[in-house]
Image (cartoon, rainbow, N blue to C red):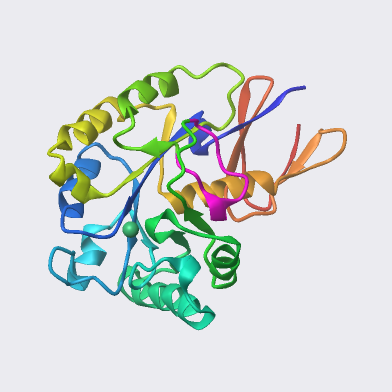
């Protein structure tokens, strides 16, 4: 018997975006994502909200509705250089400030400047951060082993249209492929290349085989998949999580509800 995992709704692939720093150009970017029904995560420095060139606290909730609000530290320091107390403060207070605006627990992060080390990773985890994005491109569609070192597929300037072609034509042995694009919205403004993301979203949108999701939705789903409990004979599977998981058995796609045990 062959068991295969799927994304929600029995979809084979997932696409997510991750944008840092909360500058005013996020407004244009959110407009493009919404137009094409894309889901994205926005990593914000709560200490710079409302400063010149940055979005304001007042607009955060409405602007990012349907997307994910996520941490990027209070003041955007190099986390590896901070004394312990300041490191804790940069992450913990960013969560507190952003949660006040978001209205839900803020559980994700991206490392300022992409810089992290063993200590900042451990401290992040201790402070309730469940994933944190790096800037190290994998140029692949793999899901991370450790979500606190979540390496994206690539930056948006790195031939994302070419990669979309291979994403659309995945080999039959691929499993849970994930296309993860990161960047800063101000880069589209500075380089005057908004068409990159507009054309990409237009060509990537409306695919019934793709799950369009925020970073935390993907992390939660992959965790639920990894927590499934099979018996040794693989005739039963139990879903102990609070998330419905989709799996295929000999080509049939099954829905496994939270708390449910299925006979395979
Ligand atoms: Zn940044």
Magenta highlight: main SS:
loop
Q: In the image, residue 180 lies at what x, y percent? A: 42, 39
Name the residue at 46% across, 67% down: 79
Query: Is 255 a magenta residue?
Result: no
User: Looking at the rendering, which quadrant does residue 17 occupy?
Assistant: top left
Q: Eyeballing the image, is 130 above or below 175? A: below
| Quadrant of the rendering where the C terminus is positioned | top right
Which residue is at the front of the view, 56 or 31? 56
Q: In the image, residue 16 lies at what x, y percent? A: 39, 42
User: Can residue 257 be seen by looking at this rendering?
Assistant: no
Q: Residue furthest bottom?
A: 85
Q: Eyeballing the image, is 114 above or below 249? A: below
The magenta-colored residue range is 140-152
User: Can residue 205 be seen by looking at this rendering?
Assistant: yes
Residue 110 horizontal side relative to residue 225, left or right: left
Q: In the image, residue 55 lies at what x, y percent? A: 18, 64
Residue 174 horizontal side relative to residue 114, left or right: right
Q: In the image, residue 90 lies at what x, y percent? A: 42, 75
Ligand 1 located in image quadrant? bottom left
Which residue is at the front of the view, 252 or 20? 20
Query: Is 146 a magenta residue?
Result: yes
Residue 3 horizontal side relative to residue 110, left or right: right
| Quadrant of the rendering where the N terminus is positioned | top right
Name the residue at 31% across, 40% down: 38
């Amino acid at each position: 018997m062959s068991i295969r995992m799927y994304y929600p709704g029995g979809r084979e692939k997932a696409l997510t975006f991750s944008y840092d720093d909360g500058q005013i150009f996020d407004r244009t970017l959110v407009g493009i994502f919404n137009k094409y029904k894309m889901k994205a995560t926005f990593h914000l420095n709560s200490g710079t909200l409302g400063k010149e060139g940055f979005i304001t606290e007042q607009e955060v909730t409405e602007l990012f509705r349907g997307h994910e609000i996520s941490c990027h530290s209070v003041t955007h320091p190099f986390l590896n250089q901070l004394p312990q107390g300041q490191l804790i403060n940069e992450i913990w207070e960013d969560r507190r400030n952003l949660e006040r605006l978001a209205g839900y627990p803020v559980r994700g992060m991206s490392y300022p400047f992409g810089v992290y080390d063993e200590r900042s990773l451990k401290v992040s985890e201790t402070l309730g951060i469940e994933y944190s994005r790096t800037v190290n491109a994998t140029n692949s569609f793999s899901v991370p082993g450790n979500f606190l070192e979540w390496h994206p597929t690539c930056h948006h300037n790195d031939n994302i249209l070419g990669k979309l072609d291979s994403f659309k034509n995945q080999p039959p042995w691929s499993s849970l492929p994930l296309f993860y694009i990161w960047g800063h919205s101000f880069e589209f403004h500075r380089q005057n290349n908004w068409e990159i993301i507009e054309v990409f979203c237009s060509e990537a949108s409306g695919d019934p085989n793709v799950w369009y999701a925020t970073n935390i939705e993907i992390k939660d789903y992959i965790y639920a998949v990894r927590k499934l409990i099979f018996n040794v004979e693989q005739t039963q599977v139990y879903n102990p999580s609070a998330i419905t998981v989709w799996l295929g058995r000999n080509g049939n796609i099954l829905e496994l509800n939270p708390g449910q045990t299925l006979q395979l």
